Image: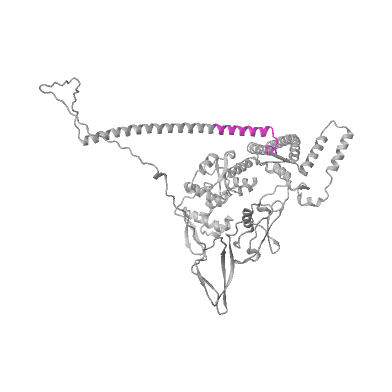
């Protein structure tokens, strides 16, 4: 049977499975004693095109699925190769297809050569004769039915009228008297129709205007209701935030709550210190400072007592939650909606430790029972066989001089070494800076939520940490909205400057929530105002202090070059060239000499309103 050499053997099995009426998975094809795989082809085993090979077909289960002789293969063609002599010492191999057919052509006579004995027929062909086309049907329903057509005819009807005359009386009781109407021309008729059309258009436009006005009223009513709901929602969120802040300060439980207390303590200390320095002098000032120190010490001690109580309350809850989570079986949902649970060796061991912990915390145990539980705990949590595998997970804290696991260390994005653990970092913050990172944490969570809504696989935003957000807020955006200068961090969000690109520190803008919604509705950045763009470019290129120094000091130089600006402001050369071009476009400086190597500027003595320091930063 002819097949292509690039055909996979799975096609062979499917073909013979259809002929033998047996499943394809029980068929097995072998060549030269090698069992062939489904994804292999003839050409992979060195079989060339137009080559005749023999493959063995067998069944892996001959008792249930035996291979029988295939009937009806006589019509299948075969291909043989014939060597044809084309010249002196020249031969050509020709592939000849032999078609097996049961058709026998009639003998039409002929003759035989007397010397060679070759027979010659009067007529003969090597191909099967063409099939006789089927006879077209000579009958149809159209030729067996009668077509009918119905047509009405109207015949003439002779009528006549009778008038009154002598000898004939015709009654006029049923006659009607018709009076001719007013005559009007075609122009008057069309004018009357035009007037009617105008009336219809007027009424329609009146109705359409009423519908449009009613629609505007409904939209306005819905808009006012939505604005009222939004105002109530904002007020409610503000009240909830104030209530949560009040609860955090009066009933602190988490580390963030105590950071707020220490931050409030630091603000109070600075206010009292400034008041004492302004109002008192010498001995009175020293006494007031001692009293302030005593009050601060008492407040710190009170905060420490509250923290100790909160830690005890949280510790038991955290331990129970940790044990419950570790001992819970692995669960997943099947396609039919049912839940499958599976216990692993780790969950079983965690459940054993949980049972031991529950027994240890019981206070009604006798001495022997408690000793038995402690022995069980000793054998359960004994030293592992290979403690070396834990060495890479342990780091040394240089402040508290302790070896702690890696989870106790906070690693920044730019840090190369690990020096202090989380506890020492928090303790240093409470003793020196006393900063509250809760507001930056909330801002970072709002950033995570907004970036997750885009669903464009943005990654940079989820790598940001609290210190990074704090740097952007304080050093780049001055902790206020770039449009309205609103400085309440609880109302600020950090969104994309160009929403078609993923969020990054160089593609972000700090706005209020309402301003962010309006900004994200812009289809193009060019729709925003030019001064806002300039302000944002300056803020992205420089921080506030550098930009103030640029606008204040550089226009007063006599000789200004990019190298001078780069050296005095400690910025890169490309930024200095961009800054000088910006100052030149504003008229603060002017070009003195322009070469291909560099451009030399000087101060503009004719005028040019220099912006105040910090005006656009």
Figure disc tally: 0
Q: Where is residue 168 in the image (x, y as percent from the top left)?
A: 13, 22
Judged from this view, the residue extending furthest toward the right is 368
- Give the position of the N terminus as an image quadrant: bottom right
Q: Residue at x 45, y 31 (%)?
A: 218
Q: Is residue 592 among the parts visible in the rendering?
A: yes
Choose between 472 and 133: the one closer to the eye: 133
Q: Is residue 573 magenta?
A: no
Is residue 117 left or right of 415 when viewed as pictured?
Answer: left
Choose between 158 and 574: the one closer to the eye: 158
Is residue 392 left or right of 78 when viewed as pictured?
Answer: right
Choose between 607 and 383: the one closer to the eye: 383
Choose between 585 and 70: the one closer to the eye: 70
Q: Is residue 189 above or below residue 176?
A: below
Q: Where is residue 160 in the image (x, y as percent from the top left)?
A: 17, 28
Which secondary structure dominates the residues rendered in magenta?
A: helix
Q: Is residue 548 among the parts visible in the rendering?
A: no
Q: Where is residue 22 in the image (x, y as percent from the top left)?
A: 65, 52
Q: Where is residue 557 in the image (x, y as percent from the top left)?
A: 52, 56
The segment highlighted magenta reads: 232-258
Is residue 156 left or right of 379 when viewed as pictured?
Answer: left
Judged from this view, the residue extending furthest toward the bottom is 88
Q: Is residue 252 above or below residue 413?
A: above
Q: Is residue 250 magenta?
A: yes
Which color scheme did the rendering employ for the protein?
one colour
Judged from this view, the residue extending furthest toward the left is 166
Locate residue 192: give its quadrant.
top left
């Amino acid at each position: 049977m002819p097949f292509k050499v690039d055909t996979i053997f799975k096609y062979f099995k499917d073909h013979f499975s259809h002929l033998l009426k047996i499943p394809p998975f029980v068929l097995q094809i072998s060549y030269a004693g090698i069992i062939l795989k489904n994804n292999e082809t003839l050409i992979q085993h060195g079989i060339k095109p137009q080559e005749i090979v023999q493959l063995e077909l067998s069944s892996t289960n001959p008792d249930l699925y035996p291979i029988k002789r295939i009937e009806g293969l006589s019509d299948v063609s075969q291909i043989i190769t014939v060597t044809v002599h084309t010249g002196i010492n020249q031969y050509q191999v020709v592939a000849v297809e032999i078609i097996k057919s049961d058709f026998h052509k009639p003998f039409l006579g002929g003759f035989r050569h007397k010397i060679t004995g070759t027979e010659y027929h009067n007529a003969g062909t090597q191909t099967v004769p063409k099939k006789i086309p089927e006879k077209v049907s000579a009958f149809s329903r159209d030729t067996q039915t009668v077509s009918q057509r119905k047509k009405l005819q109207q015949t003439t009807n002779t009528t006549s009228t009778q008038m009154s005359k002598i000898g004939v009386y015709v009654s006029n009781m049923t006659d009607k008297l018709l009076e001719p109407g007013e005559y009007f021309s075609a122009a008057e008729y069309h004018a009357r129709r035009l007037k009617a059309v105008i009336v219809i258009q007027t009424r329609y436009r009146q109705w359409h205007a009423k519908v449009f006005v009613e629609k505007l009223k409904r939209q306005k009513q819905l808009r006012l209701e939505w604005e009222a709901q939004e105002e109530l929602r904002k007020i409610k969120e503000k009240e909830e935030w104030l209530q949560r802040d009040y609860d955090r300060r009066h009933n602190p439980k988490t580390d963030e709550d105590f950071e707020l207390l220490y931050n409030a303590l630091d603000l109070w200390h600075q206010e009292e210190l400034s008041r004492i320095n302004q109002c008192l002098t010498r001995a009175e000032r020293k006494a007031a400072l001692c009293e302030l120190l005593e009050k601060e010490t008492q407040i710190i001690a009170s905060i420490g007592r509250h923290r100790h109580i909160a830690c005890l309350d949280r510790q038991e809850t955290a331990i129970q939650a940790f044990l419950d989570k570790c001992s819970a079986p692995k669960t997943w949902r099947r396609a039919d909606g049912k839940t499958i649970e599976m216990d692993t060796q780790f969950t079983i061991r965690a459940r054993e430790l949980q049972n031991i912990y529950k027994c240890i915390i019981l206070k009604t145990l006798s001495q022997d029972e408690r000793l038995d539980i402690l022995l069980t705990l000793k054998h359960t949590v004994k030293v592992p066989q290979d403690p070396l595998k834990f060495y890479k997970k342990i780091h040394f804290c240089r402040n508290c001089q302790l070896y702690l696991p890696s989870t106790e260390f906070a690693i920044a994005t730019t840090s190369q070494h690990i020096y202090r653990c989380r506890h020492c970092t928090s303790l240093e913050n409470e003793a020196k800076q006393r900063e509250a990172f809760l507001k930056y944490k909330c801002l970072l969570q709002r950033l995570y939520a907004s970036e997750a809504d885009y669903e464009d696989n943005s990654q940079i935003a989820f790598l940001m940490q609290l210190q990074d957000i704090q740097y952007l807020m304080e050093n780049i955006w001055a902790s206020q909205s770039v449009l309205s200068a609103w400085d309440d961090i609880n109302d600020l969000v950090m969104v994309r400057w160009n929403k078609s690109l993923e969020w990054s520190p160089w593609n972000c803008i700090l706005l209020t929530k309402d301003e962010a919604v309006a900004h994200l509705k812009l289809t193009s950045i060019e729709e925003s105002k030019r001064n806002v763009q300039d302000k944002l470019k300056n803020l992205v290129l420089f921080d506030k202090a550098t930009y103030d120094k640029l606008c204040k000091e550089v226009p007063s130089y006599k000789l200004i070059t990019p190298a001078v600006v780069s050296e005095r402001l400690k910025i890169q050369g490309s930024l200095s060239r961009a800054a000088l071009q910006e100052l030149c476009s504003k008229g603060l400086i002017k070009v003195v000499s322009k070469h291909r190597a560099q451009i030399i500027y000087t101060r503009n003595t004719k005028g040019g309103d220099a912006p105040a320091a910090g005006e656009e930063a």
